[in-house]
Image (tube, rainbow, N blue to C red):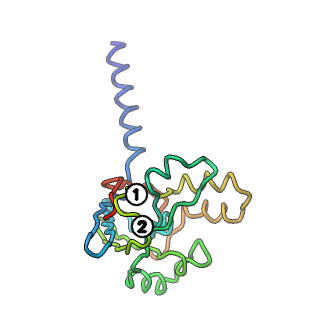
Amino acid sequence: MKKIIILFLLSIFAFIISSCEKEDLKIYASINKKDSILVLKVENTTEKNFLIEIPTLESFFYEDEFNKMGPEYFGPLTLLSMKKDSSDIKKYNALKCEGIENQTLKNNCPKFIDKNSTKKYYYKLVGYKTGRKILLKDDDFKTLLHNLNISVNDKRKENFIKLKNKTCEGYTYFTGSIKFYPDKIILP
């Protein structure tokens, strides 16, 4: 009887752990070698509409340089120049969503991903090293909060924490997790 109870409790524990680590968004990456374009297909399989400001999905690391970095290094290499999606910019302006950064539209483009949908974003690869691998990962919300806890910027930290419960006209500010497929890609 004790074994059955233990197995039952372990299975409940395993279910809780697996459900906590579920990715909210999946991103499938590919490269158009002819035009040096990185294509990110964002898939939202949830029942929520997301407004994504963080992560920016615009900066990635060379794999070998990422492995050599120390914990004090926070900035990735900027390899990409995003072709901004005009529908996202129009929606952002029409809804008058409050950006978490003062210069949201200048520095990065917010992304609107509807529930149970996919959307493609295109990035022109610039100044890259042919044949090198880049890691397809971006700082998630938890990592950014951790980095802000290290810094002394309390006002910025407060703005990030407010995102957890913030919405804009039916769009929830994204604070979840992302999984890239594949998580590494060789540059053409």
Where is 84 relative to 41, above or below? below
**Hey, which quadrant is residue 5 in on the image?**
top left
Say if mark 2 contacts mark 1, CB within 8 Å.
yes
Point out residue 139 in the picture as x, y percentages from the top left corner. Answer: 50, 57
Residue lying at 49% horizontally and 86% vertically, measured from the top left: 93
Q: Please, which residue is most extreme toward the top here?
A: 1
Of the numbered discs 2 and 1, the one sitting upstream in the chain is 2
The CA distance from mark 2 to mark 1 is 10 Å
Which quadrant does the N terminus fall into? top left
Near-viewer residue (6 or 50): 50
Residue lying at 72% horizontally and 61% vertically, measured from the top left: 154
Point out residue 84 in the picture as x, y percentages from the top left corner. Answer: 41, 80
**Hey, which quadrant is residue 134 in on the image?**
bottom left
Residue lying at 53% horizontally and 57% vertically, measured from the top left: 141
**What residue is pinned by disc 2?**
128
Rendered image: mark on residue 134: 1
The amino acid marked with disc number 1 is: Ile
Near-viewer residue (188 or 58): 188
How many numbered tags mark residues here? 2
For mark 1, give the secondary structure: strand
Near-viewer residue (134 or 119): 134
Which quadrant does the C terminus fall into? bottom left
